[in-house]
Amino acid sequence: MLSLAPTMLRPALRALPAVLGTLALFGASGVARAQLTVTVNSVEGRNVSDRPLSTPVLFNSEDCAGDNELELTIGNIPTGTTVLDFWRGTGCDQVEPRTSTTSSACTYLFSLTSFMTPSAQLWNDELSVADLGGCVEGADNTSVEVFILAATMERTPEMVTSFAQFSTRFDLVAPAPPTAVMSGSGNTAAPVSWTRTTGTINGYRVYVGTASSGEGGACGGSGLVAGELPPAGATVAATVSGTAGGASLDLAALGLAVGESASVGVVARDAALNEGVLSELACVTRVETCGYLCQRDGEVATCSTAARGPRASDARAAPGLGAAGLLAVALLSMRRLRRRSPR
Amino acid sequence: MSRPTPVSRRTRDALRTLVSAILCAAALVASTLAPGRAAAQEGLADWSEPTNPASPQRFALELRVGPYTPDTGDPVFERVFGGSSLLFGAEFDFMPLRIPDVLSLGVGAGFGSVSYSGKAASLDGTATSEATSLSLLPMSLLAVLRLDALPRLTGIPLLLTGKFGADLVYWSSSTGDAQDGEGLSPGLRWAAQAALELDFFEPRAARALDDEWGINHSFLFAEVYGSTAGGRSLPVGTPFAWSAGLGFVF
């Protein structure tokens, strides 16, 4: 009898840390363990300089298109952990939803059994954005919580040694396009203005389509169609952030020759950088312009772009330098006159 | 002597406050520019009781602003730029010849800046979105005669100044990001100025400013002037314009 006691106690002792961890995890008193740490390193196909991976990680329709993988780093994995279980949904921090065969509130995703402690990296076809379950048509800032449970034995909730969760949001609803799009003409630059879209807007993009791009558009063929998404490969002429209501287009950079026109359309971008459909199209035209001197002299020929020299930017500093010089001379003179003398 | 009415007292108080603010601002600017001197004066117990004689006065500095429209002799300027813009300027006078309490005579150098912006037209005359601009940098060298007999002899705080000399205006015009032209327009310039000496309102503060920084007098002025700047270059002068500003004699 006595000889059997160590044999019976050994599994219980081995499971003790996990039990304590479980107690801490679920709010009972016990030995507190450091939580797992979760860092989202990248989302396949995403330019993180445009869309940082700040918490909660925001996914848009572009992320949901295709099978874009998430790369995660999980840290603080307790020694002895043999499995990392991934769940999504609500209430996954409770045992019951995870063990329920009927509940869909907490959905099992997959388990990771091959990793090194205390840090594991997750990528390459192990977890995609679509796996998180938020890529549902019409999702508008839908929250999805992801739970990661570390355990000493596979799929045994009682053996949980630590846990973590991270929040995601899915926004697949593109903003409405701006209205009252207007554009002008010029030789070097032309403005495009619009009435801002209501709601939370991150910025706008101005697309340009020239006649050779296809049919349709305010200036004839352009490849852009109002009310539709910009075609793949469409030229982005300007990207403005915030609540800007206009942009200036560099006509030469767009490849427009004098006398040529191009259709422009504007799309709004929301916080998740979902791009909406194109606004009504406007037309920009590159024309030869005649400034003040040209109009005064009536010498149309002097208005040609080739006749113009570089801008005299140095002259802009002259007023400031002159005023500073005058002030300096005045102050120097004033200091010299500090010597007292009768009036 | 009748007591001042409450309204006139309020008006006078407001005026005194304004003058004090200007004088204090001048002192603050001066002390900021020379913190060492300001620190050295911190031990003075009563700044309002200066004991030093007045410092000599040989210079004047005027800071001015006013609307300016060059008389270009054609309707294009009005059509393109729509009218006047504010001209900001400064003038430094050296007054070596002085009859105490009567007048000062010397030379002044002035500098200013004003720019205009409008829309260029296409060659067929229709308006475009491209900006066209004209910038003027007037510079002048003037003989200056300043009469201060009125405030010194009669107590009326009015300075009268006349100026006459050469004007030279640098101008440049651009359309889009390209410069269309630039040049220098010479001419003659005249000016007549009436100034309200602020010492009258706060004599002790004005005296303290002199003690501390050698600023003898400060004044608000209005000036009318004209220029024939143009010659064979772009005519950018005007027969009549006005400006107003703040001046210091030191």
Image (cartoon, coloured by chain):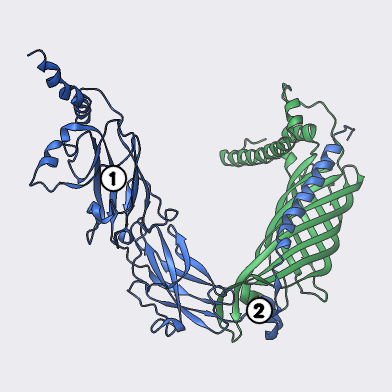
Chain colours: A blue, B green
Specify few, some or many for label 2: CA neighbours under 10 Å numbering under 14, 14-19, or 20 or more: some
Q: Report the residue at 82% width, 46% height from top.
A: A329
Q: Residue furthest front?
A: A3
How many labels, in total? Answer: 2
Quarter of the image containing the C terminus of chain A?
top right
Q: Which residue is mark 2?
A: A305
Sooner in the amino-acid sequence: mark 2 or mark 1:
1
Q: Which residue is mark 1?
A: A167
Q: Report the residue at 10% width, 12% height from top.
A: A2
Q: Is residue B227 above or below residue B101?
A: below
Is there any visible trace of residue B79 in the rendered image? yes
User: Residue A284 in the image: x percent, y percent?
Assistant: 49, 78
* Type of the residue with mark 1: Ser
Is there any visible trace of residue A295 in the rendered image? no
User: Residue A263 in the image: x percent, y percent?
Assistant: 44, 78
Q: Dot 2: what SS? A: helix
Image depth: mark 2 or mark 1 in front: 1
